[in-house]
Image: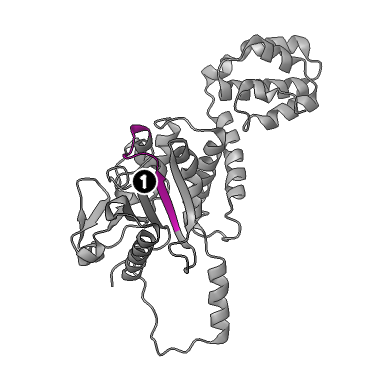
Amino acid sequence: MAAGVETAGSGNDMAHPEDVETKATKKTKKTSWHGLLAQVVTEPLTSAKISVQTEIDVTSASPKADIVLLRREGNTWTEEQKAWLADGMRDTNARELLIEFKFTESMNEWILRQLIVYDHLYQEKQQLKRSDLRSILLLSKTPNTGILEEHGFSLTNKDGVYLSNLRIFNSVCVILLNELSDAPYNAMWKCFASRRQEWQKAFARISQHSLPKTSVEHECVVFGVKKLRMEGMMENMDPTRLTPEYVMDLGRQELFASMMNSMSDEELLKFQRPANILQEGEQKGEQKGEAKLLLRLLQKRFGDLPSWTIEKVSTAKPAMLEEWSLRILDAPTLESVFADPS
C-alpha cells in the first residue's frame, strides 16, 4: 500500500450505534486547517488585491467545502501579487485558484476525485472559462511517488509542482510543500510543510524580512503558528482550541518574547542615555526598571526614539507605563502608543 493513502473498511461491516455517534462527534470537531492557512495568508494577499475566501459554496445545493479560494483583481498577476504566491500559483494565468489544503492527510484517490468534483461544480456555478480556474491540491505531507505516477502526475520545471497528463486530472495542480524551493515567495506557504527542516527554513526566511512588510497583527499570526509548530501542538491539539483568537494571543506572547530575546549587547548599549536620564528622574528602582524595559521595547518596535518619548516615559507613573506597554504590539505608530484613548 502506498504511504499516506487511507483505505475504507469492508462494505459488509455493520456500524455500531456508538461508533456512529463517535464518528459524528469527531466530524463536528474537525480541525479547520484551511481556516488556519487562510488566517496566515489573508492580510498579505488582500493588501495585494487578491481576495481570500473560505467555506466556499461550490454549488447552491451543496454544503460548504473546506477550501481556500483566491481571486485576483486584474487580468494578470502583478509582481506585488507574485511576491506572496507560491510556485504553482504564481505561474498560471487563471484568475481564480481553488485550493484544497491537506495538513494531516496525504494524496489518495478519494481526495483527488473530490477536488475534481469541486472544480467542475464551482466552474459551472460561476460560469467560468476553463482557463479562468485552476484547482490546487496543496499537501503538507509528501505522498508516495507511486500514487503520483498512477494518476499521471509528473514534476514540472518548478520544484514541488506536479501536473497530470491524464485528461480527467488535467485541471488539477498538485503542490508538495516539502519540495518547494526556498524562494521568499514560497515561505508563507511552507510554514505548513510537514518536514521540520522545511518549515523551520520558512519561518527563518520570514524573520529575515525577505518578504514585504506586514502589520503587527499579521506578525502575531505567524508567530502563533510558529509556536504551535515548535511545540508540536498542531498535530495533537483539540480542534475546538485552534481558533483565530487563540493563534493571535499565542503570537502576541511570542512576539513580545522575541523582541526581548533578540536584543544584542550592542542594542542594549544604545539605552545608556535613557538609563542615565531615568536614574535622575526616578525614585523607585522597580519603576525605573519598568521604564527602561518600555524604552527598550519601543526602540525595538519603532527604531530610534525621539527625545520627547524618553522624557515622557521617564516621568510617567507605573500605571501609565503598564498601559503603554500593553499597546506596543497593536499600535501602528509610536505616537499611537501614547495617544489619549478618549
Quarter of the rendering occupied by the N terminus:
bottom left
x, y percent for residue 266: 52, 17
- Queried whether the magenta region covers residue 79, the answer comes back as yes
Q: Mark 1 points at which residue?
A: 198
Q: Dividing the image into 4 quarters, which one contains the C terminus? A: top right
Q: In which quarter of the image is residue 208?
A: top left
Please name the residue shown 43% across and 38% down the image.
49
x%, y% of residue 289? 72, 22
**Range shown magenta:** 67-80
Front residue of this view, candidates 285 and 88: 88
Element at label 1: helix
Q: Which residue is drawn at 53% across and 76% down?
A: 23
Q: Residue at x 57, y 22 (%)?
A: 302
Q: Is residue 94 visible?
A: yes
Tell me if residue 270 comes above or below residue 318 in the rendering. Answer: above
Image spot of residue 195 (x, y percent): 37, 51
Above or below 46: residue 150: below
Q: Does the magenta stretch include residue 69?
A: yes
Give the amino acid type for the residue marked by disc 1 in the picture. Answer: Glu
Q: Is residue 228 placed above or below 28 in the rendered structure?
A: above
When the figure is inspected, residue 325 is found, relative to residue 131, above or below; the finding is above
How many numbered discs?
1
Residue drawn at point x = 32 percent, y = 53 percent: 133
Q: How crowded is mark 1: few (under 14 residues within 10 Å), some or many (20 or more)?
A: many
Q: Is residue 4 visible?
A: no
Instruction: Please tell me which residue lies in front, 280 or 185.
Output: 185
